[in-house]
Image (cartoon, rainbow, N blue to C red):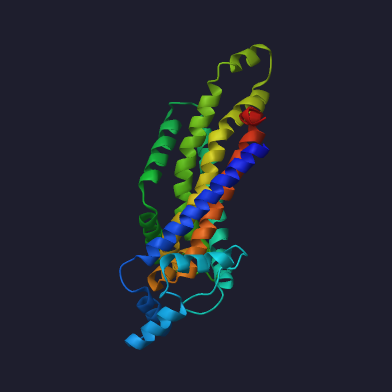
Amino acid sequence: MIKAVCGLLLRAFVVLSGATILTFALLWNAPGDPAQAIAMARFDALLTDEVVDQVRQEVGLDRSFWQAFWAWLGPLLTLDLGFSAVTGRPVWPDLAAAISYTFPLAFSSLAVGLAVSVPLALLATKRPGGWMDRLAVAAASLGNAIPAYWLGLILILLFSVKLAWLPALGASTPAHAILPALTLGLGVAASLTRIIRSGILEARGQPFLPAFRRRGIVEKSIGRDHVAPHAAIPVVTVLGLELAFLLEGLVLVEVIFGRPGLGTFLVQAILARDFAHVQAVVVLTALVFVAVNLAIDLTYRIVDPRIGESDA
């Protein structure tokens, strides 16, 4: 177990290092003058060359790439994300405010996905090949094919414009989270339904199950002790990755629904070439992926101890 955790931590270091360097390089070499973009975002007006040069020196854009990168990385090692080049405020409070909107929405979307996919997959596997099974597979395939932005716009048109049941833009009340959570949650449900269904059918087809039945073990015990753990392994993988990829999907969905979360935070930072804000989101996202992968690996060893035997 210790060897596995050390290996995961080493891979985490590689992922974090690669993500930060690559993102910094893309921002640094993006078309246009970053100093002018920062100055425009800061003053919201046309500026003279003198003001742009002053901003360039102030935020360190007159240095080389590696000098600027190490100047940002040094404080990060002490958990200091620095200051925004546009607002001049520390990054942490603004990032925490964005997280307070994004993470609850991500978990709500995951809950919606589970609430839809688990009953649908269980109904589908009652009679494999039956009409309910075919309907569930078709619904899951359709859900995977629908882009999140298109589904979000359809939900806004139906529930906000036509029926006027739910608000479309903002995040001031819990009702504002319903349509974004449905938009993301239905996409999650489409993926989970197929994985849960396949996992259950594969687990039920294991060759050792008839031997348990001949011994008189009841179906409930077989399902709980043998089918469920076997089917849970692919589900754990997809569930963890869906939670991580929800952060990626939230960028687009939050912009569509006008929510002040990480999506809006990141888009505004990219447009303003605010290096500190963009890098903060990159580091946070990479940490989430690393933490999710670690949790998945450890969960494997709990669900099926045989997976960890090679580490002994």
Q: What is the x, y in percent for residue 223?
A: 63, 26
Residue 47, placed above or below residue 94: below
Nearest the eye: 8 or 150: 8
Give the residue displayed 55% in from the left and 50% down from the top.
Answer: 13
Q: Residue furthest left?
A: 31
Picture quadrant of residue 45: bottom left
- Residue 105 screen position, x and y as percent: 54, 59
Q: Quadrant of the N terminus?
A: top right
Which of the two residues, 162 or 80, is positioned nearer the viewer here?
Answer: 80
Q: Is residue 95 visible?
A: yes
The residue at 48%/58% (across/down) is: 20
Residue 10 position, x and y percent, is 57, 46
Q: Name the image quarter holding residue 77.
A: bottom right
State the image coordinates of residue 186 (x, y, percent, origin top left): 46, 49
Q: Residue at point 40% right, 73% down?
A: 272
Q: Is residue 124 visible?
A: no
Q: Quadrant of the C terminus?
A: top right
**Image vertical order of residue 58 relative to residue 10, above or below:** below
Q: Nearer the viewer, residue 295 or 204?
A: 295
Q: Measured along the vertical axis of the image, is residue 261 above or below residue 224?
A: below
Residue depicted at 62% across the width and 65% down the height: 78
